[in-house]
Image (cartoon, grey):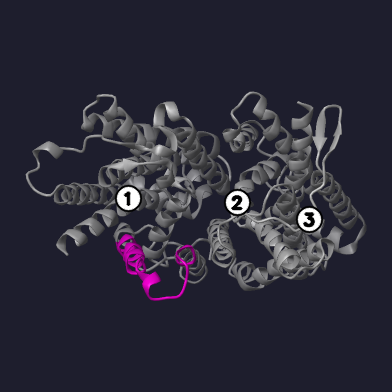
Amino acid sequence: MLQLIINGIVLGSIIALAAIGLTMVYGVLNFANFSHADFMTFGAYIAFVLNVALGLNIILSFFIAIAIAGALGVLLDFLVWKPMRRKNADLVSLVIISIGLSIIVRNAIIFIWGGSTRNFDLPVRRGIEMLGVTITHNQLIGLGTAILFMVLVHFFLKNTKLGKAMRAISDDINLARMSGIDSDKVIMWMWFIGIGLAGVAGILYGLETTIRPNMGWFLILPMFAAVILGGIGNPYGAMVGGMIIGLSQELSMLILPSEYKMGVGLGIMILVLLFKPKGLFGGTKA
Amino acid sequence: MIDYLVAISIIVGIYAIFAIGLNLEWGFTGLINFGHVGFLAIGAYTTVLMNLSGAPIWLSMASGVVLAAFFGLLVGIPTLRLREDYLAIVTIGFSEIVRLFLLNEEWLTRGPMGLFGYDRPFEAMIPFDYNYFLFILVFGSLAVIYLLLEKLVHSPWGRVLKSIREDEDVASALGKDVFRYKIQALMIGSAIAGLAGAFLAFNMQYINPRNFIPMETFYAWIIVVLGGSARNKGTILGAIIVQSFYTGTRYLQDYVPLASHQIAALRVMVIGVLLVLLMMYKPQGLLGRKEELTLGQ
């Protein structure tokens, strides 16, 4: 039981981190980005290449991979999302484009690195045992890094000009524009940070489990569940939502066969949609 | 050669039926169903399981169709009153749950081993190659579905669907119960997918959960979008093109120095790229009418 709670917290913090970017995009650009989780996978593979193939140390690989993931987010904004904004495209077109991008990214990864599972080059260390539960080193690192980044996001949103502009745009993009915020620039940074954070989450998840082409895709539903639970466009809601989803997924194993873990997020999401469609903490969109 | 063409055509026909159901949902009504394959799976497995437990094959097929429609209702209820993209999220999850159920409930579905040894309609009575009969059955059904759908979408009911797609506030301002229309479109589309599932089972003579991965849904999507959303003719054209692409690239590995998993990934990437480019630059597809399908642009 305690072990499941610990696993749940670690998984929850990873989902939470990835869900921040998803909810920001959802809030500002107003569409469900189905490709978001595949950038987790992308980040993990880039870090894997730097770490294993090029032999860089893991911390350096980590930061370079995040930057590359974030840059890809900006590139796609430039190539795809910005032209669509100019055309004033309907949200359904954006959703369909995002699933197309997801298919492209996932299969490009299979094309380049194949379908087999990979691991980072790290010394295997024994987990820490106490009170009859085991916390592995990687879990500790994952949890610590995730919390660190969440705190950074908090300070960014509260204390920097860019962060405040991002919240303003998320509340009401037209109002923000009228008060002189350069929305294209803010949106570009939002992609960098959102996809960068997805990359962080992907690397941590790869550390915690293994690196494989489907790793992100299988988390997209729990991530959407976290976003909807926390209220669309609300980064803090997404963090809490991620934790709740991670914990419930792991704890569900007490009553459900583990094969159906993925269904737990979906179940919670449907309940929220039925009874509290604005989420627990209220979002900017409903 | 003729046998080969017939075999390929059967697959085209099954995908056309599968996708024409999606066209009613997405093309005409604007519903983003990302879990269409779940209804295909329900149709296929219900047909096979009913038949294996002794039901006549026609009754089994009918049960598959009805059950698929029923699940369309279940999925629609919590989602169709809300934002359009919630349906996308819930349906894709639903289709994965269906697949996980088929994979894990071995007492019912034999899990990854799959099911075989079931009847096919009139199989004992057909004196010639069964594929020829299946060809007639599939294309006969496609023709009937096509004609019925054409009639439906040109009826007042169909015009309400299109108005919902373009602007559902206008439709409800005119006193139309938007939710009801959406549910009906989703149920009919799902029933059609269920029928396609039965035909898929007849064609393969062996089904297992791997036939029902999420990517199957997106084959239907590219068929509909490429052919032209809200154009049933376009869907049939799309099915022909996509299947030709698959057949044409099947032997590619004899000619290009790539591993087979790379070619497989590349073929799927082409589908993804095509979907993105079409939605960006030609959302009305090959046969669609630009002035009709505005998508806010």
Residue A187 appears in the picture as rendered: no
Q: What percent of the width, then of the height, locates residue B14? A: 29, 51
Q: What percent of the width, then of the height, locates residue B15? A: 33, 53
Q: Amino acid at mark 2?
A: Trp
For the stretch drawn in magenta, the main secondary structure is helix
Q: Report if residue B114 lies within the magenta region.
A: no
Q: Amino acid at mark 1?
A: Val
Residue A10 appears in the picture as rendered: yes
Looking at the rendered structure, the number of numbered marks drawn on it comes to 3
Residue at the spot of label 3: A122
Asked whether the beta carbons under mark 3 and mark 1 sit within 8 Å of each other, the answer is: no
Mark 2 surroundings within 10 Å by alpha-carbon count, few (fewer than 14), some (14 through 19), many (20 or more) = some
Q: Which residues are magenta?
A: B237-263
Name the disc covering residue A217, or none: 2
Residue B126: image quadrant is top left
Residue at 60%, 65% (x, y): give it: A88
Q: Nearer the viewer, mark 2 or mark 3?
A: 3
Secondary element at tag 2: helix
Q: What percent of the width, then of the height, locates residue A242? A: 74, 42
Residue at the spot of label 1: B153
**Farthest residue toward the left?**
B127
Alpha carbon distance from label 1 to label 2 = 36 Å
Left or right: B234, with B33 as reference point: left
Residue closest to the eye, A245 or A138: A138
